[in-house]
Structures are given as structure tokens and as C-alpha cells.
Amino acid sequence: MTSGGLPAPGRSRDPGHRQESTNLADILERVLDKGIVIAGDIRVNLLDIELLTIKIRLLVASVDKAREMGIDWWEHDPTLSSGQRDLAEENRSLRERIGALEAGRAAAGDGERRAVERSDG
Amino acid sequence: MADALVYLYAVTDADAPEPDVEEGVDGAPVRRVGTGRLAAVVSSVDAVRFGEDALKRSLEDVQWLEATARAHHGVVDAAALAGPVAPVRMATVYLDDSRVRALLTDSAAAFTAALDRVRGRVEWGVKGFAVAPDAPRDPEPDPGSGTGPGASYLARRLAERRRAAHGHEAALEAAEAAHRALAATSLASRRYPPQDPRLSGRREEMVLNAAYLVKTEGALRQVVEEHTGRGLRLELTGPWAPYSFATLEEP
């Protein structure tokens, strides 16, 4: 992703010491999970950051995104490479279901379930 | 500046040189806001793109996230080359410079203590991966010995599975021993949950994910070499700005 470009400023002073292309997972781990946590004026919920980490994992499993990010582990895994389209599809449908579940949480109670509980009691 | 917000990367010494970095998040120039002995490393950023709603949406956009995380890290890294640095979590945004100065003033003692803890020190990461031990060179089962190809396949799979389970235990133990040795050569250490293989992009199981605060990494490098092998592969990453150690509380 950074290959072929001009050497990044700030690194040229210290050649060979700093890594040119640092692993994105390592960077995300540090800039999102570590560092000083202060509530700025623009509120980004702490919970959002935790959810974000989960979401990144789901998104990384989406083949196109992962390839853009230079992650291609599935191409070396014979059990996955044949079904990569299914995996992306599955993730898409999972995300839709999560969205539907989140939207449905606020919805009205479930009449059918109450009917079942009555018949059990 | 009414249409700009202030994105905060890190806090450093007021007398440290300017970080040598071309641009920060969203291509914005990097500058410093100082008060007393402290300086904040900041960029003026677009008020719409870094407003609450846009920021929330953008954080879910992997491409935005990657670009912003790399830019944030680039500035922190440059600031760490220029002086002691306390990195602030990505996406910390203030309304204007006076709010940043107020933060520096209000938390001056805590920031100064954090900077003192990491002054002249760097963070190195060590990740340990369980690697399959080499399979013993068993001779192929004699096809004439009465076992069919199915039975010999199953026997082979069973042996592989036993070796893998044994290898996993051994790798975990080796990782613990490595961490003890690494921590003993460091000024401070912190352990983190192993990265998900999907995020690390690695198939091997991560059995150690830790950060160490050191003056120089020579001793760490030696321990990494000594403890690599026996089903464990250790990888050293760094030097990192002290993300794990420049905390406002004692780590």
C-alpha cells in the first residue's frame, strides 16, 4: 500500500529503523484501543469504539475490503478459497440481520410468544 | 476558524522540536498549541467531516478508518521522534484551540507525569504465534500390511491432531516463559488480547500479544531470539510511540 512512494517524512532521518509499512491491525489496535482517552468536545461514544473493533472484524472478513487492506489469508486456505463468495454473502446477510435486530428491539411486543406462554402456564 | 474543529493527536513537551510530518488526518497541516510546559500536537479539520454525525458514520467506513488511523499514527510517530509523547486516542476532537489549552492546563500534572514515564523510552511490541512443530518423519504405512488407504489416512489425521493439541499447549507455555523473560528486561510491560486471525491476517494462532517499554531494544531482541522455536515464533514490532504506557493513570 505504501510501496513505490516517496519515503515518508520523519522516517528518512532514521533509515532502516522504522518500518515503512506497518501492519494495519497493529496500528488500529494502538490508535483505537490505547493512547490517552479523553472526552473531546465532539463526542464519540466509548462503546462505539468497542463495537467498532467488532465491526472491523466483520468487515475485514468481507473479501473485497480485505483485499483492499492487503489481507488475503483466505487465498491460502483451501477450505475457504472455494467458498469465498459464500463467506462474503454470509457476512452481508449477517450484517442485515444485525441491523434488523437492532431496529426490531424498539418494536412492539410479540403477541404470538405471549400466547405460547399462556398455553404453557 | 469558525468552520474548523481541532483534532488532537498527542501531547508533548513545549520545548520539543516541531514534528517533521507533511500532513495529518484528512490531509490537514500539523501544528502545535502550547501552554506552560506542554504542547498539544493538532490539526485544524473540517467541521462537517469531523462533526459528531459524520465522525460516527466515517468510523464505520473501513477505507476512511485505515487512512485516518495511518495518518494519526504518522503524526504520533513523528512527534515521538521529536520528543516525549503521550498519544491520544484517535478521533479526539475539540471545538477550538482555547479548549485544547484548557485541557492542557486542567490536566497539566497528569500529562507531565505521563511524559516523564516515557521520556527517553520507546515501546516495542512482541507477538507470539503457535507454529506447528515439524511432523516426525514417519515412514509411509506399508500398503501391503493390511490397512487400507482410508484407515491409514485416519491414523495420520489422528496423529496430526494429537501433535497439534500437544503443540498448542507447548506454545502457550513457551509464550508465558517468553513474556516473563521479556518483562524482566523491560521497564514496564502490558499484555493485550491476541488479535483475531482475520484482523492479524495470519493463520497461526496468536498466543502472545504484549508491549514492552524499554530504552533500547537490544535485550528484547536477544530474548526473542532465545525463545523462538519449540512451536513458538516471536515477532518484534517497533519502535512504537509509547501508546501503551503514556497513560494518565499508572499503567
Image: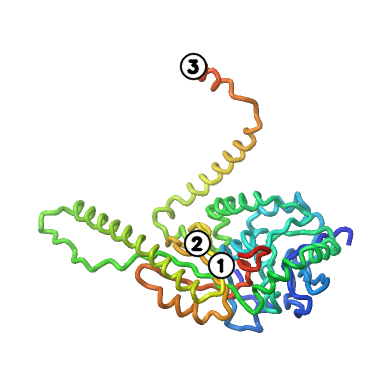
**Residue sitting at x 83%, y 61%:** B99
* Residue receiving disc 3: A121
The answer to whether the residues at label 1 and label 3 have Cβ atoms under 8 Å apart is no
> Would residue B119 appear left or right of A79 to someone viewing this image?
right
- Residue positioned 13% across, 61% down in the render: B142
Q: Which mark is residue B218?
A: none
* C-alpha separation, residue under disc 2 versus residue under disc 3: 52 Å
C-alpha gap between disc 2 and disc 1: 9 Å
Is residue B113 or residue B220 the one in the foreground?
A: B113
Q: Position of residue A83 (x, y in %)?
A: 44, 50
Residue at point 24%, 57% (across, down): B156
Residue lying at the far left of the rendered structure = B145
Discs 2, 1: same chain: no
Q: Which residue is label 1 attached to?
A: A23
Residue occupying image coordinates x 69% and y 50%: A45
Using the rendered image, report if marks 2 and 3 lie on a common chain: no
Asked if the residue under mark 1 is in contact with the one under mark 2, i.e. CB atoms within 8 Å, the reply is yes
Q: Quarter-wise, where is residue B214 in the image?
A: bottom right
Where is mark 2, residue-wise? B201
What chain letter is assigned to the residue under label 3? A
Relative to A71, B28 lies left or right: right
Q: Secondary structure at mark 2?
A: loop
**How many marks can you see?**
3
Q: Measured from the top left, where is residue B192 in percent x and y? A: 53, 61
Local crowd size for mark 3, using a 10 Å CA cut-off: few (<14), some (14–19), many (≥20) = few
Q: Amino acid at mark 2?
A: Gly
SS assignment at label 1: loop
